[in-house]
Image (spheres, rainbow, N blue to C red):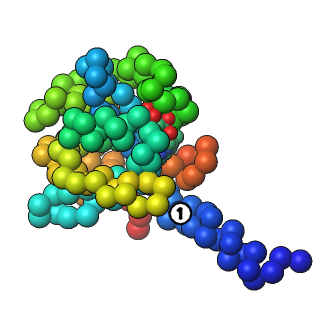
Amino acid sequence: MESSEDRRKDFCEFYHRLLSPRVAALVVALRDDGKPNVMPAAWHTPVSVKPPVLAVCISPSRYTHSLILKNKEFTINVPDLSMKDAVEMAGSKSGKDFDKSSLFKFTPATKIKTPLIEGAIGTIECELNQAIDVGDHSVLFGNVVACQARGFGEVWKGKSPLLHLGSSFYTVMKEGNPQ
Ligand SMILES: Cc1cc2nc3c(=O)[nH]c(=O)nc-3n(C[C@H](O)[C@H](O)[C@H](O)COP(=O)(O)O)c2cc1C
């Protein structure tokens, strides 16, 4: 029989699943050869509106982590369901040993050198504010310098962002507004 201690242990190991779903955001950072590297990141949050600042939690083991610390900028791109296969591919291989630039099409950003993903339903351009190491991830704070969206009023209308539930599970929002 499962003890209360076992339950507590499982709960702690998977606590982050209780905070899902979250947008499977695509983080783009520039490689040394100038090509874009893409990694999905679901651990992100806005942290300030005035000034606009967001945070994304990236393990130092990710290639993206070193690229952002070096270039001091990155873009966040909101995929829809049509990009699910490319999202999974970008999340299963590291740019350290695989050129992921052919998985997506890119378009220039407006304020920074790092490009945006063409076809993304939302894009955010960030300059690195600071990075703080916490446990097995670092929290990278980005000053939002530009932001664009298709189909976004007060809530997303039309295509839903691709939402990550954890592991290899995804979902999307039902069309229409909650009543
Ligand atoms: C949907 C999804 C969400 C992910 N979220 C994160 C995350 O928030 N932080 C993180 O460090 N890794 C996350 N990962 C894992 C990285 O995307 C994965 O390790 C990737 O291959 C790293 O690429 P890179 O080494 O080229 O930077 C996620 C993967 C997927 C598929």
| Rendered location of residue 61, percent (x, y) | 47, 42
**Residue 74 visible in the picture:** no
> Within 10 angstroms of label 1, few (less than 14), some, or many (20 or more) residues?
few
| 15 horizontally vs 179: left or right | right
Q: Position of residue 153 (x, y in %)?
A: 23, 52
| Most foreground residue, 70 or 4 | 70
Instruction: Residue at 43%, 22% (x, y): give it.
Output: 100
Q: What residue is shown at x 38% (from left), y 31% (from top)? A: 38
Residue furthest right in the image: 1
Disc 1: which residue: 16
Point 14% across, 34% down: residue: 112
Residue in the foreground of this view, choosing between 25 and 2: 2
In this rendering, the answer to whether 34 lies above or below 19 is above
66 sits left or right of 114 in the view: right
Q: Amino acid at mark 1?
A: His
Residue 179's x, y, as percent? 41, 67
* Secondary element at image label 1: helix
Residue 111's place in the image compared with 129, above or below, is above
**Left or right for 88, reference 101:** right
Quadrant of res 130: bottom left
Q: Quadrant of the N terminus?
A: bottom right
Q: Image quarter for residue 26?
A: top left
Pick whichever, 82 or 52, lies toward us: 52
From this view, report whether residue 61 is shown above or below residue 153: above
